[in-house]
Amino acid sequence: MTLLRIFLALLSPAACLLAQNQTLQPRPQPPAPPAAAPGPPTVAPDKVVLSVNDIKITAKQFNELVDSLPEQYRNNARGPGRRDFAQNLAKVLVLADEGKTRKIDQTPEFKLQEQIQTANLLAGKTFSQLAEGLKVDEGEIRAYYDAHKQDYEQVHARHILIRAAGSPAPAEAGKKELTDAEALAKSQEIRNKLAAGGDFAALAAQESDDTGSKDKGGDLNFFKHGQMVPAFDQAAFSLKVGEISEPVKTQFGYHIIKVEARKAYEDAKADVDRRLRGEMAQKTLEDLQKKANPTFDPDFFGPAPK
């Protein structure tokens, strides 16, 4: 981690108020989080683990700082990067101490920035506390999920692609280019083998023209609505777990799809709950803002938007 990143992590709140509105927008499915790194050695919480001049940081305080880091840095700072984080933290504290010696902290510019940084941190923590303290009943969660099912529903599928002439999928060197009719006939033949008990993963490894998934037995893992081309998407989400589709035509050729698992309401309930609490907290913020009635100089900022 660079010194700049440490500055950003320490001086900018992890849950900045300005970022809260992002929780109201549908988000793409995030990648699976990395495996947790081994935790730090067990020491007494009040043991001083880092000293810089007169500043003493205990194990408890250090761990709290690590917990406040953005997620992409947190595991590393808990494990193999713990000393690097501490060394960079020491640099921050040394520079801050030097800044006090130079009386930079007494300048009007610094005091204004300090005031806004403190307000930003407090605002982010207040918003989080507002959202965490709200309760959403089961009926509201279910109704929201039903109205936004396509944002949350996922399927785990495998497929076998039989490429047809003109497909944008790369052709295997030396393999015969199939006409549309030949590709359909081959896919139907494979579908019949599957219906007779053939192993899907083995046939995908042997027959599929999708170079990205054939070595994994055609496994596409979980995906959401809209991540695949429309015809594939419609077919996959219409299948039951364990069911195998008839050949599905797309611009890539003919696909045979098998659904391995589905994620539906129970899997999405916690995400929906967080989202609804975020929306309710946002409404509380809007009410607080109306009461505060902030004013903006029209000569400086221009007229208010209609």
Image (spheres, rainbow, N blue to C red):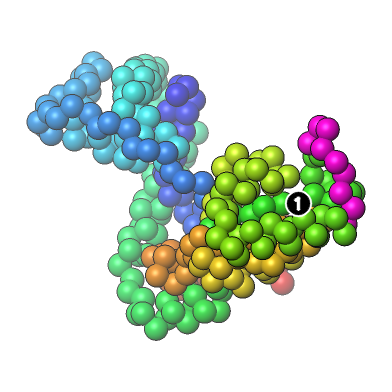
Is residue 100 in view? no
- Is residue 265 visible in the rendered structure shown here? yes
**Residue drawn at x 81%, y 60% as measured from the top left:** 184
Near mark 1 (Cα within 10 A), the count class, few <14, some 14-19 or many ≥20, is many
Residue drawn at 46 percent across, 46 percent down: 32
Magenta stretch, overall SS: loop
What is the x, y in percent for residue 118? 39, 44
**Closest to the observer, 71 or 113:** 71
Residue 302: x %, y % from top left: 72, 58
Question: Considering depth in this image, is 5 or 297 the residue closer to the camera?
Answer: 5
- In this view, 271 is above or below 69: below
Queried whether the magenta region covers residue 173, the answer comes back as yes
Residue where numbered disc 1 is placed: 162
* Kind of residue at disc 1: Ile
For the record, the magenta segment spans 172-180
Q: Nearer the viewer, residue 157 or 135?
A: 157
Q: Residue at x 19, y 22 (%)?
A: 49
Image quadrant where one finds the C terminus: bottom right
Verify whether residue 197 appears in magenta.
Answer: no
